[in-house]
Amino acid sequence: MRTLIVTALLAAASVVGAQERTPSPAGAEVYIISPKDGARVPAGKVLVQFGLRGMGIAPAGVKFDNTGHHHLLIDTDVPADLSKPLPASEKIVHFGKGQTETTLTTLTPGRHTLQLVLADMNHVPFDPPVISKKITITVK
Ligand SMILES: [Cu+2]
């Protein structure tokens, strides 16, 4: 009897500890429309356009099946632990209003990487994750 209770408590604790991840539909795909991988772009304003197939966009906080919002990763890797909400920083930019493009004005001359991660209303990546290819651009 005691073993049973302990087991039940442990199971409950592990459920609370892990953020629940939202399933993504098969075939969902996020990609960077522009700039193109390997592009050389003038310094100043770099327009980045986000593409999405097989899912829709909804603002953060809005629950609607098969939707999420974009996150642009700049010069950084996708976090190893995808069970947690994506942090917000200058390298991980949230587009919680449902934006599908942005203009970067702070990229310094040289090589930079860009990558998109779609995440759910709570900023947690989907399962399986919907992540773009990482592209490299050179700012002139
Ligand atoms: Cu977010």
Image (cartoon, rainbow, N blue to C red):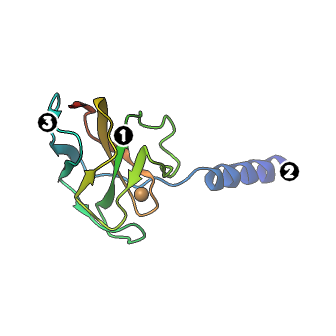
**Viewer-nearest of discs 1 and 2:** 1
Residue closer to the observer: 1 or 14: 14
Q: For mark 1, what is the residue?
A: 74
Mark 3 element type:
loop
Residue ID at (41%, 36%): 78
- Circle nearer the N terminus (3, 1): 3
> Dividing the image into four equal quarters, which quarter contains ligand 1?
bottom left
Q: For mark 3, what is the residue?
A: 36
- For marks 3 and 1, give the CA distance: 15 Å
Task: Specify the amino acid type for callout 1.
Answer: Ile
Tell me the crowding category of disc 1: few under 14, some 14 to 19, or many 20 or more residues within 10 angstroms, Cα based.
many
Mark 1 element type:
strand
Label 2 close to label 3 by CB (< 8 Å) = no
29 to 138, vertically: above or below: below
Task: Specify the amino acid type for callout 3.
Answer: Lys
Residue closer to the observer: 92 or 65: 92
12 to 72, vertically: above or below: below
State the image coordinates of residue 94 (x, y, percent, origin top left): 39, 56
Going by the picture, which residue comes out furthest to the right? 2
- Which mark, residue 92? none
Task: Specify the amino acid type for callout 2.
Answer: Arg
- For marks 2 and 3, give the CA distance: 61 Å
State the image coordinates of residue 105 (x, y, percent, origin top left): 29, 49
In this rendering, position of residue 122 left or right of residue 110: right
Residue ID at (83%, 52%): 1
- Circle nearer the N terminus (2, 3): 2
